Amino acid sequence: MDRRFVIRETATVGPEIVRLVVEAPRVATHARAGQFVIVRANEHGERIPLTICEADPAAGTITLVVQAVGATTVQMNAKEVGDHLADVLGPLGTPTEIELFGTCLVVAGGVGTAIVLPVAHALSNAGNRVVAIVGARDADHLILLDEMGVACDDVIITTDDGSAGLHGFVTDALAMLISTSTVDYVFAAGPIPMMRAVAEATRGDKIVTVASLNPLMVDGTGMCGGCRVTVGGASQFACVDGPEFDAHQVDFAALATRNTAYLAFESCRLGEIGAEIDA
Ligand code: NAD
Ligand code: FES
């Protein structure tokens, strides 16, 4: 049996959200903030993109945070220490453009916090003041708060139901910060409506705003066109040109439509996988 990509650690960090530490020495050595891997959980499985949340070249491991939303992610989250993944291809994508911007706001919606964390570290290491807004539907769905606390100068928490932090969306805290302080750069990752709302909140003040997009991907190398997004009126391939883009130029409506294309198929496959795991 192929023993590469062995899972060294697993931990549940939220409802149906698992943190996996996976052996992938070459990926760990070359990974930079903003990059991702394409993973197959099993030999005959589909390929899914996952952001590299952390990379530890000394240990030869990368950390992935997986929310069980489809057949493959349910299978991944059922894995245990000592199991392995069939493939881990990467690092892929264009790394985050890191500069000395000044004051940076990193806006994390739900499981998007795993995408924001490495970028927050990189911005901080470049000398920026980094303030995070981390939002979730409720206290249970807040993830990686300790890690964000280490990476950032300040962390503001919001929940939709008010069960932790400020009561409201991340964009409520964002509007408050923009109106009361100088903000030089904004980075956002989370659900599409959130990233679109962040872009609208910063457009008027022309604050540089970058969104990490999450289109469907297949090969991850620019060959299949599956990850096509519209940015500034032109087609871009998120896997090679992104996944990060100028949020003010992104056609979020088109992204939302493309991402729902296989929902019926995915729902059907999820039922089959549930039956296989129960059996
Ligand atoms: P969620 O739906 O619980 O939302 C998380 C937070 O986003 C909310 O608490 C709120 O603060 C904010 N938000 C949601 N809708 C908003 C709106 N209309 N306006 C302003 N703020 C809003 O998030 P979840 O269930 O953890 O996330 C799942 C979604 O994130 C999926 O759609 C998934 O595809 C997406 N996702 C995106 C990325 C990425 O790279 N951008 C990565 C992983 C997952
Ligand atoms: Fe195929 Fe990007 S995933 S071109």
Image (tube, rainbow, N blue to C red):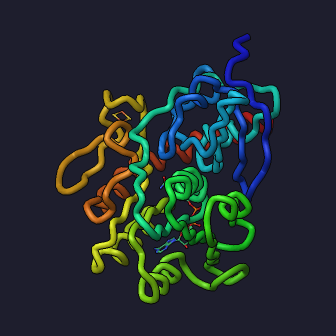
Q: Position of residue 140 (x, y in %)?
A: 74, 67
Above or below, comparing residue 138 to residue 273 in the picture: below
| Rendered residue at 62%/76% (across/down) | 156
Q: Position of residue 127 (x, y in %)?
A: 51, 59
- Quarter residue 131 falls in: bottom right
Q: Position of residue 88 (x, y in %)?
A: 58, 27
In front of the other: 43 or 114 = 114
Instruction: Quadrant for the N terminus, please.
Output: top right
| Rendered residue at 47%/67% (across/down) | 104
| Rendered residue at 31%/58% (across/down) | 246
Above or below, comparing residue 4 to residue 214 in the picture: above
In front of the other: 118 or 11 = 118
| Count of marks overlaid on the render | 0
Above or below, comparing residue 140 to residue 179 in the picture: above
Q: Position of residue 29 (x, y in %)?
A: 58, 28
Q: Residue furthest top?
A: 1
Q: Is residue 169 left or right of residue 161?
A: left
Instruction: Quadrant for the C terminus, please.
Output: top right
| Rendered residue at 37%/58% (across/down) | 256
